[in-house]
Amino acid sequence: MSWMPPTHELLSPITGDDGSQIERLQLKPLYYAAQKDALARAGDDEDEQFFELAKLATGLSAKELDQLKRPDYVSIAQYVHEMSTRPVSYFLNDTQADPDEVPLLQPLEVAGRSLTSLTLEMPVLRATKAMKKLKTAKERAEFITAHCTGLMIPDLDHLTVPDWTQLQVRIDDFLNKPADFFRSATSK
């Protein structure tokens, strides 16, 4: 069974664009591609970034979101912050034994299969050399993540942000830790 996002009971109901009364919000996971697009739309203004991400997390329009009372918005912003910064292990309360077998917050549909976890492989030197030739940090991260997961770069867009975050933590280990780090981790 996959993880389900929480429901937020509004302190003060709002009126939907269709005239209906909204009393609770079924929050949604943030996905990597949608988050990138929302942050690009918002620019550098942190308040605008949270507003764009809150629209994704709630499914509300800007007009609907503007009706929220501040405490409701703060709760949603807290959820957005957790979704944007925490790894999948935080949401699944998972202290897995194998850090290279990463459970996914939401199943990932790839080539007609539904994946519930990804197995990471350490990158070969040839891949890290190719990665360093790419122009932006985003391009480099996507290239090496695809290499280490066996996914195609477009498939990465369908990962939740916590999945992406969890993968980046382990890939950072692969790129920056010496061999002894991995020996000690597996010899327990």
Image: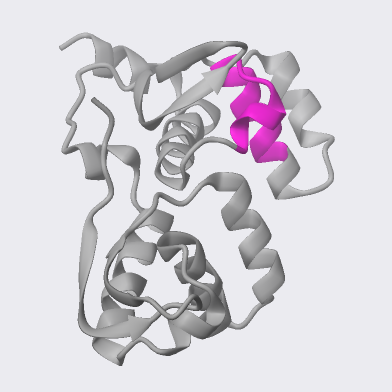
Q: Quadrant of residue 36 in the image?
A: bottom right
Question: Can you say whether 48 is above or below 151 in the image?
Answer: below
Tell me where residue 130 sits by quadrant.
Answer: top right
Residue under the point 74% across and 41% down:
139
Question: Does residue 57 appear to the left or right of 126 in the view shown?
Answer: left
Q: Residue at x 41, y 64 (%)?
A: 58
Q: Is residue 119 visible?
A: no
Magenta highlight: main SS: helix
Q: State the residue in front, 99 or 79.
A: 79
Check the picture and name the quadrant holding the N terminus: top left
Q: Is residue 13 above or below residue 127?
A: below
Residue drawn at x 43%, y 37% as measured from the top left: 163
Q: Nearer the viewer, residue 8 or 53?
A: 8
Left or right of residue 185, residue 84 in this image: right
Q: Would you say residue 180 is visible in this rendering?
A: yes
Q: In this view of the protein, which residue sits in the foreground, 171 or 103?
A: 103
Does residue 146 belong to the magenta stretch? yes
* Segment tinted magenta in the rendering: 140-157
The residue located at (32%, 12%) in the rendering is 183
Residue 128 higher or lower than 88, as above or below? above
